Image (spheres, grey):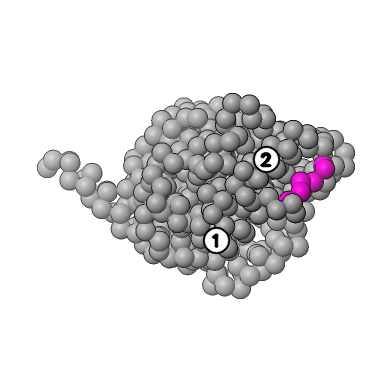
Amino acid sequence: MQSPICTMLGIEFPLLAFSHCRDVVVAVSKAGGMGVFGAASLPPERLEEELAWIDAHIGGKPYGVDLIVPNSFAGKGESGSELPPIPAEHKAFVADLLGKHGVDDGSHTLPATGGGLGENMREEGAAKLLEIAFRHPIKLIANALGVPPPLMLELGKRHGVPVAALVGTRDHALAQVRAGVDILVVAGGEAGGHCGEVATMVLVPEVAAAVEAVGAHTPILAAGGIVTGRQMAAAMAMGAHGAWTGSVWLTTAEAETNPVVKEKMLAASSRDTVRSKSRTGKPSRQLRSPWTDAWEAEGAPKPLPMPLQSLVSEPALRKVDKLSEGGHEGARTLATYWVGQGVGLMNEAMGAGQVVQEFKEDWIAACDRLNGFIGD
């Protein structure tokens, strides 16, 4: 395909798959797209293990790595790795919520402080991950939640690896262009995980026009609710050069998603998601459940700033996942995960490579349909 994304990344089809699962990354890259490994939560030694495994199984195909180095979060700029303590109100709220669903058996505890869990979001922690990532033959490095740190941009240029950045507004996109990023991932509010308020159908052409107006030629990957080839074709008709996807891979055979959550996703409609700060402290879209409803209810504590809110939510949700897989009904009810509004179109479980093939076929069919509207 004649897309600058394909040329820049050395891939056949401009479909990028963000996933925390190394098996998905490998399968997508082997099928002609590009897998991008989400590494933000991994300690350095685990990242080394995961990337070494990918190198050994991907057959030389291109892949990328995604990190989160936000421009603002609790404790940013402060020395040391300790974060402020978690308020007693939030601990009590979580304990009560779990208890109402019979989940808390007395063994669930929250850390008194953040400890080193926010280290990967600090520049020094991110630097360790970047050092490891660039030891491997990655073909893309991506940053979420703000302009990439100078070190990421510098290492990208030094190693000839394009740097991508996620944006949710026109102004954010122009700031990234000025910073010198190589690819804009333009994510609409339909997206799973962290997202803004502007819909993909509005944001993609808005950013494309703005980039063109300043004389830039930065390629655009559309993101947000895209789970089919026809949606990808529509985004490219609006000015994108390809698609960045995440949610659609969560129900694939390779994905390590909790099977209970997979079942929920396959049965969900596009209305069964909610955009909330309750999981990370920044707005992110996730599958609605009594867990998300409780945080949005009147009287619920205000979510803490990133990364403190994750220290409240993640230990509890890990326990919920574990118990739900064992058949615990209260945990099954609470179980949730990040997913976009495109979940309403995710109705069949299949392999990641098959998903890529479906994208290709659906994309071609959509282009043929559009061409059919052009008269002789």
Q: Earlier in the sequence, mark 2 or mark 1?
A: 2
Tell me the magenta residue range: 108-113
User: Neighbour class for label 1 at 10 Å: few (<14), some, many (≥20)?
Assistant: few
The reply to whether residue 223 is in sight is: no
122 or 270: nearer the viewer: 270
Q: Which residue is mark 1?
A: 327
Residue ID at (66%, 54%): 319
Is 43 magenta? The answer is no
Left or right for 259, reference 225: right
- Real-space Cα separation, disc 2 to disc 1, in angstroms: 21 Å
Quick check: 306 above or below 255? above
**Position of residue 22 in the picture relative to residue 234 (left or right):** right
User: Looking at the picture, how far across and down is residue 172, in whole percent?
Assistant: 57, 30
Q: Which residue is mark 2?
A: 96
Toward which corner of the image does residue 112 lie, by quadrant? Answer: top right
Q: Nearer the viewer, residue 336 or 83?
A: 336
Tell me if 149 is positioned left or right of 238 in this view. right
Q: Nearer the viewer, residue 83 or 120?
A: 83
